[in-house]
Image (spheres, grey):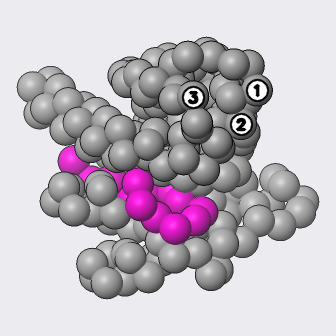
Amino acid sequence: MKLLLLASGSGTLAQAVIDAGFEIGAVLSDQPGAQVLDRAAAAKISTKVIPFKKPRAEWDQELINYVQSVSPDLVVSVGFMRILSSEFASKFKVINSHPALLPNFPGAHAVRDALSAGVNQTGCTVHWVDAGVDTGQVIAQRIVDVLPNDDEASLHERIKIVERQLIVETIKSLESQSERS
């Protein structure tokens, strides 16, 4: 199964996927200076940068055109900090990793929101991407306890450790299901 990774930042989730040995057709980022691009280049994986621009419809179409050219079996959003259009979500099989137990705490500030809510547990979710923001069907989740001394950075770092394991396990499971069908 050929993957295309979407990422905007340091690329620790992408690195976990790279290290797991999956076939990765490309890494696509919206951020020209993103560290994930260096990680991909070091692994000899093709990279593409499509900086966000307006009008939004043109950017969406540029993403769609590029992803179609790679022909992935699965698009994996690993820290891609842009909402994908409903057209994109309908054209490709897309999963996303999110640092909360959805449906709780969707959006870009999930860890901060969990701390503000005073929950004892949060975690991470891998879900199918649909037209909403973190509203797609949940594939897998893992719980992470919130410790009394946690701040946003410490909690997020502990979630990321679990998230890296979960995204790799989820892709392996989807790959296995794909091979059986």
The magenta segment is: 1-14
- Residue at 47 percent of width and 30 percent of height: 124
Residue 10 counted in the magenta span = yes
Q: Disc 3 vs disc 2: Cβ atoms closer than 8 Å?
A: no
Label 3 amino acid? Pro
Q: Secondary structure at mark 1?
A: helix
Q: Quadrant of residue 134?
A: top right
Q: Nearer the viewer, residue 179 or 31?
A: 31
Side of 72 where 52 appears, left or right: right
Residue 73 appears anywhere in the view: yes
Q: Bin the neighbour count of mark 3 within 10 Å (Cα to Cα): few under 14, some 14-19, many 20 and up.
A: few
Amino acid type of the residue that numbered disc 1 sits on in the rendered structure: Ser
CA–CA distance in space, label 1 to label 2: 6 Å
**For mark 2, what is the residue?**
112
- Rounded to the nearest whole Å, what is the CA distance between mark 3 and mark 2? 14 Å
Residue 71 visible to the viewer: no
Neighbours of disc 1 within 10 Å: few (<14), some (14-19), many (20+): few
Q: In the shown orientation, is residue 43 left or right of residue 48? A: left
The residue pinned by badge 3 equals 148
Relative to 119, residue 151 above or below = below
Residue that carries the numbered disc 1 in the rendered image: 116
Camera-side residue of 101 and 72: 101
Q: Is residue 22 above or below residue 146?
A: below
Residue at the (79%, 60%) spot, across then down: 58
Of 119 and 160, nearer the camera is 119
Q: Measured from the top left, where is residue 157 in percent x and y?
A: 48, 49
The quarter in which the C terminus is drawn is: top left
Q: Which residue is depicted at the point 84% across and 55% down? A: 56
x, y percentage for residue 123?
48, 27
Q: Are marks 1 and 2 in contact (CB under 8 Å)?
A: yes
